[in-house]
Amino acid sequence: MSRQSFLHPIVVSLLALSLFACDGPAGDTEQASTGELAAVDTATPPVDASETLTGTAEPAGTGSLLEKEIIVLPADQTGLDWLDSAEAWGGLDEAPSLGVPYLLFTAVGERWETMSNEMTVQRKKQIFYRFMLPLVLHANKMVRERRARVLDLQAGLADGRSLTPEDIEFLRQGLVELRIAGDDDVADLSISTPELGAWLDQVLVRLDEIPAGLALGQAAYESGYGTSRFAIQGNALFGQWTYGGEGIKPEEQRTSLGDHRIASFEWPFDSVRGYFMNLMSHPSYADFRRLRAQQRAAGEPLDSLVLADGLLKYSERGQAYVDDLKGIISHNGLDEADDVELRDEPMHFVVVADDQAAVADIETELDQMRESGELVTIYERMRLD
């Protein structure tokens, strides 16, 4: 295996990033599902990451895969057995309060299409939701952190506190990313900008969490539990359209809709990030944001089934899409995920290898990259804090 072919999945596996600091996919994108439900069966029942990367964190000495910051699993029954073990998801059977394991998968992969065909529908759903849930919870964690910063800045301004240059840049970037203001509008942003107070209010309406059950339901709906051509070829989990000339061309592209394609992504979290940015910023989802803000104002927990009603424009099928989505959420009990949290443990990245021999090759190269410092360099580039 060449260094180039191996380095790419490792680089993209370090995928925790700021929803403010990173753009979405190239070109203007929006969610516009075709609403094809055929692939989704609803009738079936704290360690410092930098220390870990440099090898200075104290290992547990138990031989546990969780001692590794990047876990390499074979795409076979051995890998599935580990996911069922107490180290991963099996621990929740004994102690649900442990939280969701902090395991971020780095690709959907062609092997998933083959493996899923050999599973029961129920098992396929289970594995897919385990794949997706930590990615969604990580995105919500990043949103919470940035929302808390905005709330702190808002309170500080009310108390007469000034803004640092870092604060100004943070707000400037957020206002543009969330489509509240344009680059020219915020070029001279300062504490004396007349619109600043109103803009901060708008940021807090847009920069907020998406209940996990809703995201799981839409990912299952749009990607056929990760088995669609778009998911396999481009890690596209939410049916996001792009008109920039890039992406995956639908087999039956309708010319009346222009040169629309399905946006592709290098890794799954990038698709999750694009989904979050669309719901937080696109004009089509103003109803979703309004319902979410109402729940916040009432002091209610965010509810997947309630907020799904704000997604009439997510698909050209309109209300029929929303009804099907709510059916998926209800039938599979996905709204139970609205209240879950990530486990209080270091983030781990999961790379899936073709077989056990490939696992050994990847782990050997990982050791070399760790020793040379390449992993630290990758970590610093990925903004994991």
Image: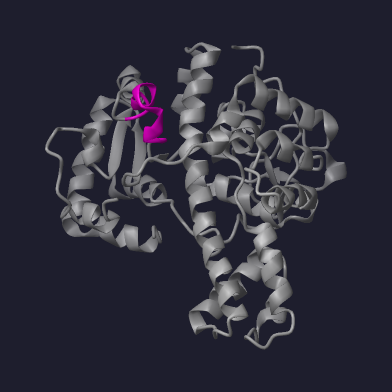
Q: Is residue 3 above or below residue 74?
A: below
Answer left or right for 143 relative to 244: left
The quarter of the image holding the C terminus is bottom left
Answer left or right for 373 relative to 109: left
Q: Is residue 97 magenta?
A: yes
Can residue 85 be seen here? The reply is: yes
Give the x, y percent position of residue 40.
65, 21
Q: Quadrant of residue 161?
A: bottom right
The structure's colour scheme is one colour
Give the x, y percent position of residue 76.
35, 20
The quarter of the image holding the N terminus is top left
Residue 149 versus residue 358: which sits nearer the camera? 149
Residue 323 versus residue 112: which sits nearer the camera? 323
Give the x, y percent position of residue 279.
69, 50
Q: Quadrant of residue 219?
A: top right
**Residue sitting at x 49%, y 55%:** 142
Highlighted range, magenta: 88-100
Count the marks. Answer: 0
Residue 262 versus residue 45: which sits nearer the camera? 45
**Residue sitting at x 45%, y 19%:** 115
Q: Is residue 175 magenta?
A: no
**Residue sitting at x 32%, y 20%:** 81
Can residue 182 be seen here? The reply is: no
Q: Residue furthest right?
A: 256
Give the x, y percent position of residue 366.
23, 46
Answer left or right for 275 relative to 89: right
